[in-house]
Amino acid sequence: MHKVNIFSEISRLQKIMIHSPGREHNFVEPNNVAEYIEKDGQIIANPDYLLFDDIVLLSRMQQDHAHLKDVLVATCGYENVYDFTQLLEGVLHYEKVKIELIDKIVNQEKSYGWKVSDKHKKLMQNNLDPHELSFVLMSGYLPNNYEKVLNWPLPNTMFARDLVAAVGNAFVLSYASENARKRDMLLSRTIIQNHKAFAECEIIDLQGTEKKLTVEGGDILVISDKIVLIGISERTRFDVVKHLAPQIFAQGFEVIYAVDMPKKRATMHLDTIFTRTNIDECLTFSPIILAEGTDDLHLNIYRFTSDEKKFEHKNPVGSNLIRVLEQDNLHLNPIICGGSNPIHQAREQWSDGANAFAIAPGKILMYERNKHTLKELNKVGYEVISSDEFVRNADLFLNDFSRKMAITIFGYELSRGRGGPRCLTCPIIRA
């Protein structure tokens, strides 16, 4: 059996990686949550912005995330739900890996203006056990006296989807566009390349192909066993297509769609406006996904096949993603995030109403706060049930293929970082 097996967004989940929010959130300061600041009478981008929009209540965030994890454990079994921190501590036991990782992090910090002191570098190399060192790497601080070692904590690590993408039987390693996410993606690459759980896994690594090439997992959707979507977004450049396409086609896929999106905070990844929920259904943010016009909200969608020699810009095949997919015989009925009211649509897209995660066909995880989206799901036959109810009856629900359900977690604090259930989960194997 392959250690990585993802040929669908909706097939029964068997193995997954997540990161439970923890100590890193306690080190986020008010100056880290403002996207723009005033300096010398000018409004400028805040260099210390960590892509979170508020100071979170960690205890509540952990409680909500625990409900998510309970659903995943009930679906996959405890041993098949990998924890990012435990994986990180596992590779930090290897002396050579640890020393190389610390060197890379020191150089990375230097590249955006933070100098790690020689004292702190030697301390990390020689005096901290893997648990203590992982605390430093995640929080930026020493665990006992809270001396600052690294410039920022890593609150976005809980969005495990962006750390690595499983495509077919391979991992696509992620490279961040924003400084705030470069360290956690360096940690994830170190885990995938060195942890025994992933030994001999196929790896697609874009390092060295082109400078400043960035790709994040929220922009890669394995929409079927034939089709992969790559979002061209704030975080993923179009140039990534020409490097990824040959390696994705080598996994047996037949078509790649590059989906060029509006470059906005609300639409940072493709999965913030579109996710598949069932064999014939998907959640959509309709003002963009279904747009046919030429305003700044519409998509430009490019189609590539394995027999092409170049994977570069050409004439788009359309702007309405649902209609474009029909050209390859993938027929999906759109369920509208927020319902018919444009205000509800915009509000619930912002709180991740279009970002669902399927644990099986027609059985999806959603935030409970997106009431209008849940009503739309209910209209087309999805039962809305709590995570606790699902866990109590997981085997019954998972083996009843006739029932569709939206399994809800509260998500009030989780959504403050602009990410939903798909963002929080990195599936490794689906049936």
Image (cartoon, rainbow, N blue to C red):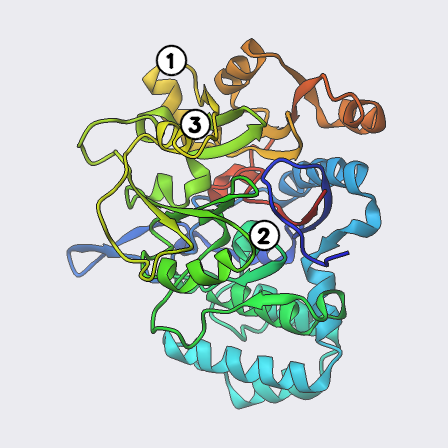
The residue carrying pointer 3 sits among few (fewer than 14), some (14 to 19) or many (20 or more) residues within 10 Å by Cα, namely many
State the SS at label 1: loop
Compare residues 38 and 63 and report the one nearer the observer.
63
- On residue 284, which mark appears? 3
379 above or below 229?
above
**Measured Cα–Cα span from mark 1 to mark 2:** 31 Å
* Extreme-left residue of the structure: 41
**Measured Cα–Cα span from mark 3 to mark 2:** 22 Å
- On residue 387, which mark appears? none
Q: Which residue is drawn at 55% across and 39% down?
A: 224
292 above or below 156?
above
Which amino acid is tagged 3?
Answer: Thr
The answer to whether residue 245 is visible is yes
For marks 1 and 2 on the same chain, the one whose residue lies earlier in the sequence: 2
Q: Residue at x 71, y 37 (%)?
A: 12
The answer to whether residue 120 is visible is no
Horizontally, residue 340 falls left or right of residue 329, namely left
Q: Which residue is drawn at 50% across and 81% down?
A: 106
Residue 431 lies, in percent from the top left, at: 72, 42
For marks 1 and 3 on the same chain, the one whose residue lies earlier in the sequence: 3
Residue 321 lies, in percent from the top left, at: 36, 32
